[in-house]
Amino acid sequence: MTENLLTGLVTRTQSGFAWVDTPSGVFTCRLRGKLKQHHSLSDILAVGDTVDISVGGMDEGMVEFVHPRNRVLSRQAPDARGLREQVLVANPDQVILVFACADPPPHVRMADRFLIGLEKHGIPARIVLNKKDIGDLPAIEAMFKHYKGLGFPVHYVSAKMNEGMEELRSILVGKLSVLAGPSGVGKTSLLNALQPGLGMQVREVSKSSSKGRHTTQVRELFPLDGGGWLADLPGIRSLGLWDIQPEELDGYFREIRDLVPYCQFNDCTHRTEPGCAVRKAAEEGKINPVRYDSYLRLRFGDE
Ligand SMILES: Nc1nc2c(ncn2[C@@H]2O[C@H](COP(=O)(O)OP(=O)(O)OP(=O)(O)O)[C@@H](O)[C@H]2O)c(=O)[nH]1
Ligand SMILES: [Mg+2]
Ligand SMILES: [Zn+2]
């Protein structure tokens, strides 16, 4: 059996089938029964997985083996047994966090919530501020300017005016990227502007997601002309935060992580303790005070 295996990328899942893109074409596959023993389908297989398939017909096959994932984009999802991790995209190379310059207005605190979850899961992130044709651009730039220094590039674009699309295309080349962010910021519009030929499919996805209950389940990766794949995540407010303990947070705020050794107490929570290097840096403007505030809110849960 092993002699005829093909290796490919899962680009779509639906109703127990997976669409697998291989060098020999796309195959619609079922999952070999033994793979389903311990888990539900969504745990075993997600878009972005690399799989080995056996070919059973012209364009049909069977998933025989799922390659280990290097990282996952996940969310906390309710099910019969309580809350569990739901894999949205396997092996993402980067997440493009999309916010709008206006309508809806951007919130850096929400950006921080996403960034911390992505940092925990080791997923590189970029920030895109869409709708630069509306809103107070200088004010927005001032709000977001500290992210670049933290290693999160910021791009100002407009899907509607087709501005900044070449810049975005260049950062997507050859990668599996995911558009994420709150509802209404223009993620689907960006996907359409970046890859106009997809229009039809994109509308289907947003139509079903606005009605459906499983609005955050990504089921499709869209191929990009320049090489690479793009997933469009329906609007959500955070990602990957579900398994973070408050005391772990220090490690996921890059600028705080570096200061922690200088706090007087080694169990410092950076709120009221004397000799806290983090609070001092925030007061002196050496770290962004809004990021410090995001940290406190995540750590002490007053959000
Ligand atoms: N002015 C302006 N409006 C835009 C731009 N991009 C998108 N919009 C509008 O913003 C609204 C929301 O766009 P969508 O692409 O559906 O947003 P989304 O992020 O996919 O939303 P969800 O699917 O709910 O998460 C639509 O009315 C778009 O026409 C832009 O660059 N400028
Ligand atoms: Mg959308
Ligand atoms: Zn401290």
Image: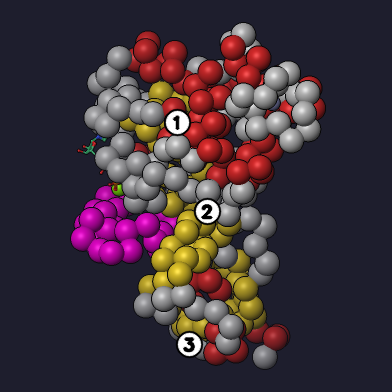
Which of the 4 quarters of the picture holds residue 217?
A: bottom left
Q: CA distance from mark 3 to mark 2?
A: 41 Å
Counting residues from the start of the chain, the first of labels 3 and 2 encountered is: 3
SS label for mark 1: helix
Q: Which of labels 1 and 3 is toward the front?
A: 1
SS label for mark 2: loop
The colour scheme is secondary structure
Q: How many marks?
A: 3
As drawn, the label of residue 109 is 1
Q: CA distance from mark 1 to mark 3?
A: 51 Å
Q: State the residue in front, 193 or 124.
A: 124
On whether residue 200 falls in the magenta region, the answer is: yes
Magenta range is 198-223
Q: State the residue in front, 79 or 121.
A: 79
Instruction: Tell me what residue is drawn at x 54 percent, y 31 percent.
Output: 296
SS label for mark 3: loop
Which quadrant, please, contains the C terminus? top left
Relative image position of residue 172 (x, y in whole percent): 51, 40
Q: Marks 1 and 3: CB-CB under 8 Å? A: no
Instruction: Tell me what residue is drawn at x 49 percent, y 34 percent.
Output: 297
Relative image position of residue 288 (x, y in whole percent): 56, 18
Residue of label 2: 242
Q: CA distance from mark 1 to mark 2?
A: 17 Å
The kind of residue on which mark 2 rests is Trp
